[in-house]
Image (cartoon, helix red, strand yellow):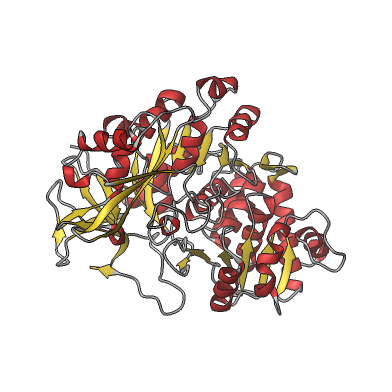
């Protein structure tokens, strides 16, 4: 029997297979090796190496046009020097509130070259949230799109503010372009003493957003683990549809940098535009959240067939569970190219389900990535190993975050970090996520996770979206309430929903109440805002789809 590869050998093989490591001319190879040695596994190194290996290749395509790797390297040098001239130095924090465009990428790389930390602000945050987060994280500068000017106004007082995407900036207002131009002759950049880190904010769906500190990995091992399961290759043409401020989008920005990928970016997600961009640019990898896949499929076979999506080799989904038969429907439409990653802001990636996994078990979150430890624990903090037994999910590995900013503590057992979810394993070692630990509903002494009921309802013909919550009940303590969005033209009744669940799950899991809505309220990253689903079936505020979706 062949032995398991050593970590070093495994990483080398995975990076070579992906093309991140590849034969090169001796002079270029030496320059690349020197860049990696000096800058480490950072966004800065990815940019510099790509400019050495593929100077004339396209690095970014957005609504403003395209940039080559050579242009990107030169512009980020200028931006880093321009920021430094205004007082931004190593270990300073720079807040970033931008949609998906070159300005986001350039700011992230420039901060990496400076050794500054990046605070990623959610574009769905209201002004008070932005001010509160910035008061806690203390950025010295805020880079933002002009559409967020009012929201960052309070936070930007007494701080350097820089416009990223703007139509008509005021003459005195610094912009990324003006800083790039000013920094063009500002001297040389030396690698910082320590690489900058990213502060990724939790979604804030249940309270004040917390800042999760994510440092650059010390090795390429975590990336190798991911690339061994998701078939990404060098020089992909990758459309990142999820927000770049989200950990899933950020991961593909960093990985794409290492693979010298062409990043296709659009400021707002639109299902039809996504299909058109795939066709126009020959996109080979699509990075999405499940709700985006649902909206693409909602266009129907005729619309999907109008544009050529045959170039797609990888559809990488994360951010929430794949509901109902969504995985099967996606693969039936686009081929067996779907990969589902389970993780969190705190742990990065934990498990990955390959197309084969999803064909066999569409609801699975897959198997642990090499180098990552995934364990389940009971209420007594004892590890659970029996298949089918549910427990709290804990994860360990190099990509696990270093803690929250401020005084918030991590929940840990045996050095592993909690994801906040509950799940179980099957006999093949595949993980299934039952639901959020804090969303468990106790009805008549029975423990119910909404996710299981949501998954069942999502399989009912005519259902587009669904969310299940618990509401107070005098007899049972809590009862289930389902909020359902029907597909266009579908005729569904509350009785249809209840009968379907009753035929699928235990009687105590049948929702007593069924409320039909035009759409579910969601965050900018596509997560359902269950707190906005009022107890009487009405919304605290009328739901609108976030503009980024």
Tell me the residue at 14%/58% (across/down).
445
117 and 447: which is toward the camera: 447
Q: Classify residue 132 as left or right of residue 321.
A: right
| Image vertical order of residue 505 relative to residue 95, above or below | above
Residue positioned most to the right = 171
Q: Classify residue 103 as left or right of residue 511.
A: right
Q: Position of residue 320 (x, y in %)?
A: 40, 48
441 and 200: which is toward the camera: 441
Q: Position of residue 101 (x, y in %)?
A: 66, 49
Tell me the residue at 30%/33% (across/down).
496
Q: Quadrant of the N terminus?
A: top left
Based on the displayed image, in which of its 4 quarters is residue 179 positioned? bottom right
Based on the displayed image, in which of its 4 quarters is residue 515 positioned? top left
How many numbered callouts?
0
Q: Position of residue 333 (x, y in %)?
A: 45, 24
| Image vertical order of residue 154 relative to residue 378, above or below | below
Residue positioned most to the left = 386
Can residue 457 be seen here? The reply is yes
Q: Classify residue 168 as left or right of residue 446.
A: right
| Image vertical order of residue 404 relative to residue 358, above or below | below
Q: Quadrant of the C terminus?
A: top right
509 and 342: which is toward the camera: 509
Tell me the residue at 17%/65% (across/down).
379
Q: Position of residue 83 (x, y in %)?
A: 72, 69
Can residue 189 be seen here? The reply is no
């Amino acid at each position: 029997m062949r032995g398991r590869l050593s970590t070093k050998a495994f990483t080398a093989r995975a990076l070579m297979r992906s093309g991140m490591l590849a034969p090169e001319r001796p002079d270029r190879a030496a320059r690349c090796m020197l860049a990696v040695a000096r800058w480490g596994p950072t966004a800065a190194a990815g940019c510099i190496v790509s400019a050495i290996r593929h100077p004339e290749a396209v690095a970014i395509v957005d609504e403003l046009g395209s940039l080559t790797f050579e242009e990107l390297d030169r512009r980020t040098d200028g931006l880093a020097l321009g920021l430094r001239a205004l007082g931004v130095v190593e270990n300073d924090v720079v807040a970033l509130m931008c949609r998906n465009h070159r300005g986001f990428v350039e700011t992230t790389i420039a901060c990496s070259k400076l050794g500054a930390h990046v605070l990623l602000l959610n574009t769905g945050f209201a002004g008070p949230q932005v001010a509160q987060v910035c008061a806690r994280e203390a950025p010295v500068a805020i880079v933002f799109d002009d559409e967020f000017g009012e929201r960052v106004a309070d936070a930007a007082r007494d701080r350097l503010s820089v416009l990223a995407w703007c139509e008509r900036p005021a003459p005195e207002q610094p912009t990324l372009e003006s800083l790039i131009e000013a920094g063009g002759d500002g001297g040389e950049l030396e690698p910082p003493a320590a690489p900058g880190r990213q502060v990724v904010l939790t979604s804030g769906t249940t309270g004040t957003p917390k800042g999760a500190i994510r440092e650059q990995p010390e090795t390429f091992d975590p990336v190798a683990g991911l690339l061994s399961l998701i078939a990404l290759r060098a020089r992909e043409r990758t459309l990142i549809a999820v927000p770049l401020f989200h950990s899933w989008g950020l991961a593909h920005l960093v990985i794409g940098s290492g693979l010298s990928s062409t990043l296709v970016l659009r400021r707002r997600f639109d299902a039809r535009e996504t299909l058109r961009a795939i066709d126009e640019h020959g996109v080979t990898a699509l990075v999405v959240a499940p709700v985006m896949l649902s909206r693409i499929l909602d266009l129907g076979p005729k619309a999907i067939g109008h544009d050529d999506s045959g170039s797609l080799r990888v559809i990488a989904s994360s951010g929430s569970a794949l509901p109902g038969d969504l995985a099967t429907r996606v693969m039936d439409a686009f081929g067996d190219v779907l990969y589902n990653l389970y993780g969190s802001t705190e742990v990065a990636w934990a498990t990955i389900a390959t197309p084969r996994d999803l064909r066999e078990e569409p609801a699975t979150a897959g198997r642990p990535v090499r180098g990552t430890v995934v364990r389940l624990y009971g209420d007594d903090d004892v590890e659970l190993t029996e298949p089918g037994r549910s427990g709290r999910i804990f994860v360990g590995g190099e990509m696990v975050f270093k803690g929250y900013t401020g005084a918030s503590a991590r929940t840990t057992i045996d050095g592993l970090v909690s994801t906040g979810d509950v799940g179980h394993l099957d006999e093949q070692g595949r993980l299934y996520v039952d639901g959020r630990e804090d969303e468990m509903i106790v009805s008549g002494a029975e423990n119910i996770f909404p996710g299981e009921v949501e998954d069942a309802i999502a399989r009912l013909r005519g259902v587009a979206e669904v969310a299940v919550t618990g509401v107070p009940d005098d007899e049972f303590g809590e009862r289930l309430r389902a909020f359902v969005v029907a597909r266009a033209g579908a005729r569904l009744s509350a009785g249809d929903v209840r009968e379907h669940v009753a035929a699928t799950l235990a009687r105590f899991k049948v929702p007593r109440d069924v409320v039909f809505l035009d759409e579910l309220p969601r965050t900018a990253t596509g997560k359902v805002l269950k707190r906005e689903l009022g107890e009487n079936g009405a919304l605290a505020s009328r739901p609108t789809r976030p503009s980024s979706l």
